[in-house]
Amino acid sequence: MQPLAERLRPKKLDDYIGQRHIVGEGAILRRMIEAKHIPSFILWGPPGVGKTTLAQIIANQLETPFYTLSAVTSGVKDVRDVIQKAQNNRFFQSSSPILFIDEIHRFSKSQQDSLLAAVEKGIVTLIGATTENPSFEVIRPLLSRCQLYVLKALERDDLLLLLHRAITTDVELKKKNIELKESSALIRYSGGDARKLLNILELVVGSDDNDNIVITNSLVEERLQQNPLAYDKDGEMHYDIISAFIKSIRGSDPDAALYWMARMIEGGEDPKFIARRMVISAAEDIGLANPNALLLANAAFETVMKIGWPEGRIPLAECAVYLATSPKSNSAYLAIDAALAEVRKSGNQPVPLHLRNAPTSMMKELGYSDGYAYPHDYPGHFTPQQYLPDTLKDMRFWHAQHSPSEEKMYKWMNTCWGDRFKD
Protein backbone atom coordinates (compact mmCIF):
# COMPACT_ATOMS: atom_id res chain seq x y z
CA MET A 1 0.00 0.00 0.00
CA GLN A 2 1.22 3.51 -0.81
CA PRO A 3 2.09 5.83 2.10
CA LEU A 4 -0.56 8.38 3.04
CA ALA A 5 1.53 11.26 1.70
CA GLU A 6 1.67 9.60 -1.71
CA ARG A 7 -2.03 8.73 -1.73
CA LEU A 8 -2.93 12.34 -1.01
CA ARG A 9 -0.54 13.89 -3.53
CA PRO A 10 -2.73 16.32 -5.53
CA LYS A 11 -3.01 16.03 -9.31
CA LYS A 12 -4.53 19.47 -9.97
CA LEU A 13 -3.37 22.96 -9.11
CA ASP A 14 -6.69 23.74 -7.41
CA ASP A 15 -6.01 20.93 -4.92
CA TYR A 16 -2.48 22.13 -4.16
CA ILE A 17 -2.05 23.44 -0.61
CA GLY A 18 0.19 26.39 0.26
CA GLN A 19 2.57 28.61 -1.75
CA ARG A 20 -0.18 31.10 -2.61
CA HIS A 21 2.46 33.74 -3.34
CA ILE A 22 3.42 31.87 -6.53
CA VAL A 23 0.42 29.64 -7.40
CA GLY A 24 -2.53 31.47 -5.84
CA GLU A 25 -5.12 33.24 -7.98
CA GLY A 26 -3.34 35.71 -10.24
CA ALA A 27 0.16 34.71 -9.05
CA ILE A 28 2.98 34.56 -11.57
CA LEU A 29 3.51 30.80 -11.80
CA ARG A 30 -0.22 30.04 -11.94
CA ARG A 31 -0.63 32.47 -14.85
CA MET A 32 2.17 30.75 -16.77
CA ILE A 33 0.74 27.29 -16.06
CA GLU A 34 -2.72 28.37 -17.21
CA ALA A 35 -1.17 29.83 -20.35
CA LYS A 36 0.59 26.44 -20.84
CA HIS A 37 3.92 28.15 -21.27
CA ILE A 38 6.56 27.97 -18.54
CA PRO A 39 10.29 28.68 -18.52
CA SER A 40 12.91 26.55 -16.82
CA PHE A 41 12.96 27.29 -13.12
CA ILE A 42 14.29 26.18 -9.75
CA LEU A 43 12.15 25.67 -6.66
CA TRP A 44 14.03 26.48 -3.45
CA GLY A 45 12.50 25.64 -0.10
CA PRO A 46 12.55 23.32 2.92
CA PRO A 47 11.52 19.66 2.67
CA GLY A 48 7.87 18.67 2.38
CA VAL A 49 6.47 21.93 1.00
CA GLY A 50 5.37 20.60 -2.39
CA LYS A 51 8.30 21.00 -4.80
CA THR A 52 7.94 17.58 -6.45
CA THR A 53 4.15 17.76 -6.38
CA LEU A 54 4.13 21.14 -8.10
CA ALA A 55 6.41 19.85 -10.85
CA GLN A 56 4.13 16.86 -11.47
CA ILE A 57 1.02 19.06 -11.54
CA ILE A 58 2.66 21.30 -14.13
CA ALA A 59 3.49 18.30 -16.32
CA ASN A 60 -0.12 17.05 -16.02
CA GLN A 61 -1.65 20.41 -16.89
CA LEU A 62 0.71 20.99 -19.80
CA GLU A 63 0.13 17.40 -20.97
CA THR A 64 3.80 17.01 -21.71
CA PRO A 65 6.24 14.12 -21.04
CA PHE A 66 7.69 14.20 -17.55
CA TYR A 67 11.17 12.87 -16.80
CA THR A 68 12.70 12.80 -13.36
CA LEU A 69 16.24 12.33 -12.08
CA SER A 70 17.65 12.21 -8.57
CA ALA A 71 20.93 14.02 -8.09
CA VAL A 72 21.86 11.40 -5.51
CA THR A 73 21.82 8.42 -7.89
CA SER A 74 22.23 9.91 -11.40
CA GLY A 75 25.43 10.63 -13.30
CA VAL A 76 26.29 12.61 -16.43
CA LYS A 77 25.38 9.61 -18.62
CA ASP A 78 21.90 9.46 -17.05
CA VAL A 79 21.40 13.15 -17.77
CA ARG A 80 22.41 12.74 -21.42
CA ASP A 81 20.22 9.65 -21.84
CA VAL A 82 17.15 11.49 -20.53
CA ILE A 83 17.85 14.50 -22.73
CA GLN A 84 18.11 12.18 -25.74
CA LYS A 85 14.78 10.51 -24.85
CA ALA A 86 13.15 13.91 -24.44
CA GLN A 87 14.45 15.00 -27.84
CA ASN A 88 13.20 11.82 -29.51
CA ASN A 89 9.75 11.99 -27.89
CA ARG A 90 9.00 15.64 -28.47
CA PHE A 91 7.57 15.29 -31.99
CA PHE A 92 5.37 18.30 -32.77
CA GLN A 93 4.32 19.15 -29.24
CA SER A 94 4.32 22.85 -28.46
CA SER A 95 5.56 22.31 -24.92
CA SER A 96 9.03 20.96 -24.24
CA PRO A 97 9.22 17.80 -22.13
CA ILE A 98 9.81 18.56 -18.46
CA LEU A 99 12.94 17.29 -16.76
CA PHE A 100 12.54 17.37 -12.99
CA ILE A 101 15.74 17.05 -10.97
CA ASP A 102 15.31 16.53 -7.25
CA GLU A 103 18.09 17.81 -4.99
CA ILE A 104 19.76 19.59 -7.89
CA HIS A 105 22.22 21.14 -5.43
CA ARG A 106 23.90 17.72 -5.22
CA PHE A 107 24.69 17.67 -8.92
CA SER A 108 28.39 18.14 -9.68
CA LYS A 109 29.59 20.92 -11.97
CA SER A 110 30.00 18.47 -14.86
CA GLN A 111 26.46 17.15 -14.37
CA GLN A 112 25.08 20.68 -14.35
CA ASP A 113 27.18 21.59 -17.41
CA SER A 114 25.59 18.68 -19.29
CA LEU A 115 22.17 20.33 -18.87
CA LEU A 116 23.09 23.74 -20.30
CA ALA A 117 22.65 23.15 -24.02
CA ALA A 118 19.35 21.27 -23.62
CA VAL A 119 17.91 24.02 -21.42
CA GLU A 120 19.15 26.82 -23.67
CA LYS A 121 17.80 25.20 -26.86
CA GLY A 122 14.46 24.34 -25.24
CA ILE A 123 14.93 20.59 -25.69
CA VAL A 124 13.71 20.25 -22.10
CA THR A 125 12.10 22.56 -19.60
CA LEU A 126 14.14 22.11 -16.45
CA ILE A 127 12.47 22.14 -13.05
CA GLY A 128 15.01 21.78 -10.29
CA ALA A 129 14.24 21.32 -6.60
CA THR A 130 16.66 22.22 -3.83
CA THR A 131 16.70 22.74 -0.09
CA GLU A 132 19.97 24.70 -0.33
CA ASN A 133 20.62 28.23 -1.55
CA PRO A 134 21.01 27.90 -5.35
CA SER A 135 23.42 30.84 -5.39
CA PHE A 136 25.98 28.59 -3.69
CA GLU A 137 25.12 25.22 -5.17
CA VAL A 138 24.01 25.80 -8.80
CA ILE A 139 26.52 26.96 -11.42
CA ARG A 140 25.98 30.52 -12.61
CA PRO A 141 25.39 29.69 -16.33
CA LEU A 142 22.57 27.29 -15.38
CA LEU A 143 21.13 29.63 -12.75
CA SER A 144 21.03 32.49 -15.27
CA ARG A 145 18.86 30.34 -17.59
CA CYS A 146 16.30 29.58 -14.89
CA GLN A 147 13.77 31.54 -12.91
CA LEU A 148 13.98 31.07 -9.15
CA TYR A 149 10.89 30.58 -6.99
CA VAL A 150 11.17 30.40 -3.20
CA LEU A 151 8.75 28.03 -1.45
CA LYS A 152 7.88 28.53 2.22
CA ALA A 153 7.19 26.13 5.05
CA LEU A 154 3.46 25.46 5.21
CA GLU A 155 1.53 27.68 7.59
CA ARG A 156 -0.74 26.43 10.37
CA ASP A 157 -3.92 26.92 8.33
CA ASP A 158 -2.39 24.98 5.43
CA LEU A 159 -1.47 22.09 7.70
CA LEU A 160 -4.93 22.00 9.31
CA LEU A 161 -6.51 21.93 5.86
CA LEU A 162 -4.26 19.03 4.91
CA LEU A 163 -5.19 17.13 8.09
CA HIS A 164 -8.88 17.64 7.43
CA ARG A 165 -8.48 16.48 3.83
CA ALA A 166 -6.58 13.37 4.93
CA ILE A 167 -9.14 12.36 7.55
CA THR A 168 -12.17 12.98 5.34
CA THR A 169 -11.01 11.87 1.89
CA ASP A 170 -8.34 9.19 2.22
CA VAL A 171 -9.70 5.72 1.44
CA GLU A 172 -7.90 4.03 4.33
CA LEU A 173 -8.43 6.70 7.00
CA LYS A 174 -12.15 6.92 6.21
CA LYS A 175 -12.47 3.33 7.39
CA LYS A 176 -11.99 4.61 10.94
CA ASN A 177 -13.89 7.20 12.93
CA ILE A 178 -11.16 9.78 13.59
CA GLU A 179 -11.73 12.86 15.73
CA LEU A 180 -9.06 15.55 15.65
CA LYS A 181 -9.55 16.92 19.15
CA GLU A 182 -6.14 18.60 19.45
CA SER A 183 -3.72 19.45 16.67
CA SER A 184 -0.90 21.56 18.13
CA ALA A 185 1.45 18.59 18.67
CA LEU A 186 0.94 17.40 15.10
CA ILE A 187 1.62 20.93 13.83
CA ARG A 188 4.66 21.38 16.07
CA TYR A 189 6.30 18.08 15.16
CA SER A 190 5.68 18.58 11.45
CA GLY A 191 7.56 21.90 11.37
CA GLY A 192 5.74 23.07 8.26
CA ASP A 193 6.56 19.85 6.38
CA ALA A 194 3.44 18.33 4.79
CA ARG A 195 5.05 14.94 4.23
CA LYS A 196 6.16 14.71 7.85
CA LEU A 197 2.71 15.75 9.06
CA LEU A 198 1.02 12.99 7.08
CA ASN A 199 3.61 10.43 8.15
CA ILE A 200 2.97 11.30 11.80
CA LEU A 201 -0.79 11.11 11.30
CA GLU A 202 -0.45 7.73 9.62
CA LEU A 203 1.77 6.46 12.44
CA VAL A 204 -0.62 7.65 15.15
CA VAL A 205 -3.69 6.18 13.44
CA GLY A 206 -1.99 2.99 12.26
CA SER A 207 -0.73 2.08 15.72
CA ASP A 208 -4.27 1.96 17.10
CA ASP A 209 -6.45 -1.12 16.51
CA ASN A 210 -9.64 0.69 17.50
CA ASP A 211 -11.98 2.06 14.88
CA ASN A 212 -12.72 5.11 17.05
CA ILE A 213 -9.63 7.29 17.47
CA VAL A 214 -9.47 10.64 19.29
CA ILE A 215 -6.28 12.45 18.40
CA THR A 216 -4.87 14.54 21.27
CA ASN A 217 -1.50 16.16 21.88
CA SER A 218 -0.58 13.58 24.52
CA LEU A 219 -1.47 10.71 22.16
CA VAL A 220 0.78 12.15 19.42
CA GLU A 221 3.67 12.62 21.86
CA GLU A 222 3.24 9.12 23.25
CA ARG A 223 3.13 7.46 19.82
CA LEU A 224 6.10 9.34 18.48
CA GLN A 225 8.27 8.70 21.53
CA GLN A 226 10.94 11.02 20.21
CA ASN A 227 12.76 14.13 21.24
CA PRO A 228 11.26 17.07 19.34
CA LEU A 229 14.74 18.59 19.20
CA ALA A 230 16.30 15.61 17.39
CA TYR A 231 18.42 16.90 14.55
CA ASP A 232 17.42 15.96 11.01
CA LYS A 233 19.75 17.43 8.42
CA ASP A 234 17.15 16.85 5.73
CA GLY A 235 14.23 18.19 7.76
CA GLU A 236 13.00 21.32 9.46
CA MET A 237 15.46 21.02 12.38
CA HIS A 238 18.20 21.72 9.85
CA TYR A 239 16.86 25.26 9.75
CA ASP A 240 16.01 25.54 13.45
CA ILE A 241 19.44 24.41 14.65
CA ILE A 242 21.38 26.67 12.29
CA SER A 243 19.11 29.53 13.38
CA ALA A 244 19.92 28.81 17.04
CA PHE A 245 23.63 28.62 16.18
CA ILE A 246 23.69 31.98 14.40
CA LYS A 247 21.57 33.66 17.08
CA SER A 248 23.95 32.36 19.76
CA ILE A 249 26.88 33.94 17.91
CA ARG A 250 24.90 37.17 17.47
CA GLY A 251 24.04 37.09 21.17
CA SER A 252 27.73 36.65 22.19
CA ASP A 253 27.28 33.23 23.85
CA PRO A 254 30.23 31.01 22.84
CA ASP A 255 29.00 28.04 24.89
CA ALA A 256 25.62 27.98 23.17
CA ALA A 257 27.30 28.44 19.77
CA LEU A 258 29.53 25.41 20.45
CA TYR A 259 26.56 23.35 21.66
CA TRP A 260 24.49 24.01 18.52
CA MET A 261 27.54 23.37 16.36
CA ALA A 262 28.05 20.04 18.13
CA ARG A 263 24.40 19.17 17.44
CA MET A 264 24.95 19.81 13.75
CA ILE A 265 28.20 17.85 13.67
CA GLU A 266 26.65 14.85 15.42
CA GLY A 267 23.68 15.05 13.06
CA GLY A 268 25.96 14.72 10.03
CA GLU A 269 25.65 18.30 8.77
CA ASP A 270 27.92 19.29 5.89
CA PRO A 271 30.91 21.18 7.44
CA LYS A 272 30.90 23.54 4.45
CA PHE A 273 27.36 24.59 5.33
CA ILE A 274 28.41 25.47 8.90
CA ALA A 275 31.51 27.33 7.67
CA ARG A 276 29.52 29.23 5.04
CA ARG A 277 27.00 30.43 7.61
CA MET A 278 29.82 31.68 9.84
CA VAL A 279 31.20 33.72 6.95
CA ILE A 280 27.76 35.32 6.58
CA SER A 281 27.52 35.94 10.33
CA ALA A 282 30.97 37.54 10.40
CA ALA A 283 29.85 40.06 7.78
CA GLU A 284 26.27 40.58 8.97
CA ASP A 285 26.51 40.52 12.77
CA ILE A 286 30.11 41.46 13.61
CA GLY A 287 30.94 43.57 10.60
CA LEU A 288 32.92 46.73 11.19
CA ALA A 289 33.09 46.19 14.95
CA ASN A 290 35.82 43.64 14.20
CA PRO A 291 36.72 43.40 10.49
CA ASN A 292 39.17 40.59 11.28
CA ALA A 293 36.21 38.31 11.96
CA LEU A 294 35.43 38.04 8.26
CA LEU A 295 39.05 37.16 7.53
CA LEU A 296 39.05 34.43 10.17
CA ALA A 297 35.72 33.02 8.99
CA ASN A 298 37.03 32.84 5.42
CA ALA A 299 40.23 31.21 6.69
CA ALA A 300 38.17 28.63 8.63
CA PHE A 301 36.15 27.85 5.51
CA GLU A 302 39.31 27.35 3.43
CA THR A 303 40.97 25.27 6.16
CA VAL A 304 38.00 22.89 6.41
CA MET A 305 38.11 22.46 2.63
CA LYS A 306 41.83 21.62 2.80
CA ILE A 307 42.11 19.35 5.83
CA GLY A 308 38.73 17.63 5.74
CA TRP A 309 37.05 15.80 8.61
CA PRO A 310 37.23 15.16 11.57
CA GLU A 311 40.11 17.63 12.04
CA GLY A 312 37.97 20.35 10.44
CA ARG A 313 35.86 20.56 13.60
CA ILE A 314 38.75 22.37 15.34
CA PRO A 315 38.99 25.46 13.07
CA LEU A 316 35.18 25.56 12.98
CA ALA A 317 35.07 25.64 16.78
CA GLU A 318 37.85 28.23 16.93
CA CYS A 319 35.94 30.45 14.52
CA ALA A 320 32.63 30.01 16.36
CA VAL A 321 34.18 31.07 19.67
CA TYR A 322 35.95 34.03 18.04
CA LEU A 323 32.76 35.25 16.38
CA ALA A 324 30.67 34.83 19.52
CA THR A 325 33.18 36.73 21.68
CA SER A 326 33.72 39.54 19.16
CA PRO A 327 31.99 42.93 19.52
CA LYS A 328 28.94 43.19 17.28
CA SER A 329 27.80 45.66 14.65
CA ASN A 330 25.29 45.36 11.82
CA SER A 331 25.89 48.89 10.51
CA ALA A 332 27.21 47.71 7.11
CA TYR A 333 24.25 45.30 6.77
CA LEU A 334 21.78 48.08 7.52
CA ALA A 335 23.62 50.53 5.28
CA ILE A 336 23.58 48.39 2.13
CA ASP A 337 19.88 47.57 2.65
CA ALA A 338 19.13 51.29 3.02
CA ALA A 339 21.12 52.06 -0.14
CA LEU A 340 19.33 49.29 -2.07
CA ALA A 341 15.96 50.63 -0.91
CA GLU A 342 16.89 54.11 -2.12
CA VAL A 343 18.02 52.80 -5.53
CA ARG A 344 14.72 50.95 -5.96
CA LYS A 345 12.84 54.07 -4.92
CA SER A 346 14.69 56.77 -6.89
CA GLY A 347 15.93 54.72 -9.87
CA ASN A 348 19.06 55.34 -11.91
CA GLN A 349 20.18 58.80 -10.87
CA PRO A 350 22.82 60.39 -13.16
CA VAL A 351 26.46 60.29 -12.10
CA PRO A 352 27.73 63.84 -11.39
CA LEU A 353 29.90 65.10 -14.27
CA HIS A 354 33.03 65.53 -12.15
CA LEU A 355 32.90 61.81 -11.18
CA ARG A 356 32.50 60.48 -14.70
CA ASN A 357 35.27 58.75 -16.60
CA ALA A 358 36.71 60.77 -19.51
CA PRO A 359 38.76 58.42 -21.74
CA THR A 360 38.12 60.45 -24.95
CA SER A 361 38.61 64.09 -25.90
CA MET A 362 34.90 64.44 -26.70
CA MET A 363 33.98 63.37 -23.17
CA LYS A 364 36.42 65.91 -21.76
CA GLU A 365 34.81 68.61 -23.91
CA LEU A 366 31.43 67.62 -22.47
CA GLY A 367 32.77 68.26 -18.99
CA TYR A 368 33.29 64.66 -17.92
CA SER A 369 35.69 64.54 -14.96
CA ASP A 370 35.99 68.32 -14.99
CA GLY A 371 36.44 69.68 -11.47
CA TYR A 372 37.26 66.36 -9.83
CA ALA A 373 39.61 66.85 -6.89
CA TYR A 374 42.13 64.02 -6.43
CA PRO A 375 42.06 63.36 -2.64
CA HIS A 376 45.70 62.27 -2.44
CA ASP A 377 46.78 65.77 -3.50
CA TYR A 378 45.39 67.21 -0.26
CA PRO A 379 46.47 67.06 3.41
CA GLY A 380 45.21 63.93 5.09
CA HIS A 381 44.35 62.50 1.65
CA PHE A 382 40.93 64.14 1.83
CA THR A 383 39.09 67.11 0.39
CA PRO A 384 35.33 67.63 0.54
CA GLN A 385 33.40 67.23 -2.70
CA GLN A 386 30.09 65.76 -3.79
CA TYR A 387 30.06 62.03 -4.53
CA LEU A 388 26.33 61.23 -4.49
CA PRO A 389 23.90 62.19 -7.28
CA ASP A 390 22.55 65.75 -7.05
CA THR A 391 19.12 64.67 -5.79
CA LEU A 392 20.68 62.54 -3.05
CA LYS A 393 23.67 64.68 -2.10
CA ASP A 394 22.70 64.93 1.58
CA MET A 395 21.56 61.29 1.95
CA ARG A 396 23.02 59.11 4.74
CA PHE A 397 23.09 55.32 4.58
CA TRP A 398 25.85 54.28 6.99
CA HIS A 399 25.46 55.14 10.66
CA ALA A 400 28.28 54.15 13.00
CA GLN A 401 27.48 51.95 15.97
CA HIS A 402 29.17 52.04 19.35
CA SER A 403 32.20 49.77 19.23
CA PRO A 404 35.83 50.87 19.55
CA SER A 405 36.51 50.11 15.90
CA GLU A 406 33.54 52.08 14.59
CA GLU A 407 33.99 54.95 17.04
CA LYS A 408 37.37 55.48 15.40
CA MET A 409 35.77 55.48 11.93
CA TYR A 410 33.04 57.83 13.15
CA LYS A 411 35.55 60.33 14.55
CA TRP A 412 37.47 60.31 11.27
CA MET A 413 34.27 60.91 9.30
CA ASN A 414 33.44 63.83 11.59
CA THR A 415 36.92 65.24 11.01
CA CYS A 416 36.44 64.96 7.25
CA TRP A 417 32.79 65.89 6.77
CA GLY A 418 31.82 67.78 9.91
CA ASP A 419 28.06 68.07 10.53
CA ARG A 420 27.14 65.65 7.75
CA PHE A 421 28.14 62.70 9.94
CA LYS A 422 26.76 63.93 13.23
CA ASP A 423 23.96 61.53 14.26
Image (tube, helix red, strand yellow):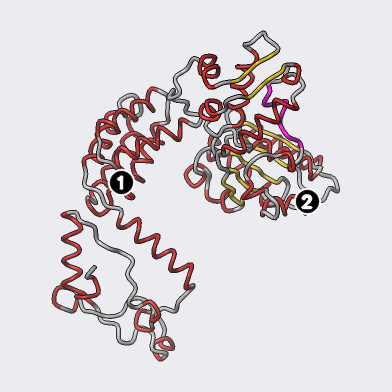
Farthest bottom residue in view: 365
Q: Position of residue 291 (x, y in %)?
A: 24, 51
Which image quarter: residue 199? top right
394 vs 224, left or right, is left
The residue under label 1 is 282
Find the magenta span and give its range.
Answer: 4-11
Is 311 magenta? The answer is no
Farthest left residue in view: 379
Residue type at mark 2 is: Lys
Q: Are there few (<14), some (14-19), or many (20+) residues within 10 Å of tag 1?
A: many
In the foreground, 218 or 125: 218
396 vs 118, left or right, is left
Q: Is residue 357 above or below residue 308?
A: below
408 vs 252, left or right, is left
Q: Position of residue 122 (x, y in %)?
A: 72, 50
Give the residue displayed 24% in from the left and 57% down from the top. 401
